[in-house]
Amino acid sequence: MKIALIGYGKMGQTIDDLIKQKYSKKHEIILRGDSANAHTFSADALSAADVAIEFSTPETAVANIEKCFKANVPVVVGTTGWYGKLKYISEMAKEQNQSILYASNFSIGMNIFFHINKELAEKMNKYEQYEVKIEETHHTTKKDSPSGTAITLAEDIIWNLNRKEKWVKGNQYDSDELGIKSHRLDDVKGLHEIKYSSKIDEIEIKHSATSRDGFADGAIMAAEWIQGKKGVFKMKDMLGF
């Protein structure tokens, strides 16, 4: 499989290294796009790829997805912070018969955690004595805060917990709001904690990433899975949740 790698930050480099170490007999990177060569990074250049993996920035993600569609190349998107344009991109994918799989987190373990989070929120819906909050910790160079993963977790809780209407950042929030507290520390790959607290006990679930390889491996698996498919997909479609 010929892969166009769009974005060459920490995740782009990890994907590149993992393909060389683990997938070199199956896949190859034929294009590496970043801010340095953005002026030459065109739909024509993309057209030789079987799939694109996009980990850029919230400001450039939509334009990169549009280039992939123009080149008729399925795209796996790990960038977050652009979801305000999701409806626009989804409609474009359907109108142009293109393929996109997007996720706030490609780790298989994290996606299992997403599923557990939904199930727990559904069970906790009728126990109003429990207050819920989220804390997330990442490396100091992470651009978005809260993380896209934390927002996904929060939205899934809100969907299943009738007493919460929206999420807010920080420690100060009303009873119908879900608080997300963010921390930025050196070289933390990703830690997400969800805690339900009452006056008599606490229930806590957490996911801690110890290596970026888990995110990279999931993105490569998604790139393999999307081959031959048309439409808009999420990791739950690939994993069957």
Image (cartoon, helix red, strand yellow):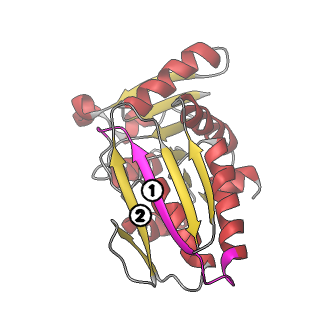
For the residue marked with disc 2, what is the amino acid?
Answer: Ile
Quarter placement of the C terminus: bottom right
Q: Secondary structure at mark 1?
A: strand
Residue 197 vertical position relative to residue 204 in the rendered view, above or below: below
Q: Residue at x 66, y 66 (%)?
A: 118
Choose between 143 and 192: the one closer to the eye. Answer: 192
**Mark toward the start of the polypeptide (1 vs 2):** 1
Quarter placement of the N terminus: top right
Choose between 199 and 223: the one closer to the eye. Answer: 199
Q: Residue at x 56, y 28 (%)?
A: 213
Q: Which mark is residue 180?
A: 2
Cβ–Cβ under 8 Å for marks 1 and 2: yes
Q: Position of residue 14 (x, y in %)?
A: 47, 25
For the residue marked with disc 1, what is the amino acid?
Answer: Glu
Q: Which residues are magenta?
A: 124-141
One can see residue 66 in this view: yes
Q: Position of residue 5 (x, y in %)?
A: 44, 32
Determine which quarter of the picture holds residue 224. Answer: top right
Q: Position of residue 116 (x, y in %)?
A: 70, 59
Q: Secondary structure at mark 2?
A: strand
Q: Residue furthest right?
A: 240
Q: Which residue is mark 1?
A: 135
